[in-house]
Image: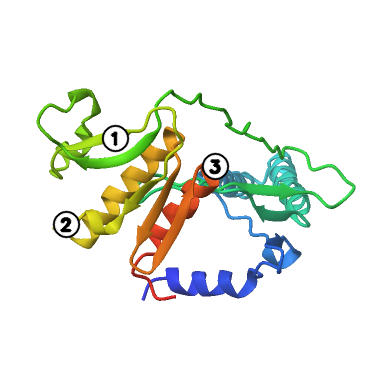
Amino acid sequence: MTLAKPIRWFLDSRIAAPDPRGRVRLAYRQVFILPTARGWGFALLLLLMLLGAINYNNSLGYGLTFLLAGLGQVALYHTYRNLTGLELRAGATREVCAGEAAGFELLLHNPAARDRPALQAARQPSEAGDQGRGSDDFRGFRQFHSGDSLRHVNWKAVARGQGMLTKEFGGDRVEECWLDWATLEGLDTEARLSVLCRWVLDAAREQRHFGLRLPGVSLGPDQGPAHRDRCLRALAAHGLAP
């Protein structure tokens, strides 16, 4: 039996669960200062200095050793005091697709009036922007027919072995585009979800007016990031028990 399980049990028993607002406050029982490689090296150095002072009965050696040990204890105390009382909060998390790297923000809040030296918080600027709308509105995909422009072929679908699909556009009219589960006959469940996810991302990127139909789920035509996220969540939750 390794020491990992007892240590994990000990830490879990002392770390408090978040409150209803998702905050964790670092109390005195929840701050752990563990030695690093430099810390172990400092302790070894103090031990060697103590042995040398004992061997040679050197008063200056005793004084220097105890002075450095005292400074180490003072540093531990101030580090401990600097961390206690901080609040940890979960920040915004960007939704990602399967296989992509997910980033999680962790926010530090200092509710006390005193300063917290050597603690810094950085905020990344939000990435926001508007994309211009083209003169043609995306309507959906259909099977490729002889004579179709090769510029409108969904080559990503061809590379995935899903056949040649042609993008349909409806001019300047705002027409409803339905991304329908039933149009992908012959593909298994995962392949259908993958194709629909790609269609949702393409339609959202081009700011198209589209809807999504899944077995038991129908999201009416709309556009914008919120509608895109609703469609992606519906695809991610497909097949899961309610």
Q: Is residue 212 left or right of residue 13?
A: left
Measured from the top left, where is residue 131 in percent x and y?
Answer: 51, 26
Compare residues 91 and 144 and report the one nearer the observer: 144
Q: For the residue marked with disc 1, what is the amino acid?
A: Glu
Residue shown at the point (57%, 46%) measured from the top left: 39
Give the crowd class for mark 3: few <14, some 14-19, many >=20 residues within 10 Å: few
Q: Nearer the viewer, mark 3 or mark 1?
A: 1
Judging by the rendered image, the residue that carries numbered circle 3 is 38
Q: Secondary structure at mark 2?
A: loop
Q: Are marks 1 and 2 in contact (CB under 8 Å)?
A: no
Measured from the top left, where is residue 168 in percent x and y?
Answer: 29, 35
Q: Which mark is residue 187?
A: 2
Q: Are marks 3 and 1 in contact (CB under 8 Å)?
A: no
Compare residues 165 and 193 and report the one nearer the observer: 165
Judging by the rendered image, the residue that carries numbered circle 1 is 168
Spatial CA distance of label 3 from label 2 is 57 Å
In this view, 75 is above or below 186: above
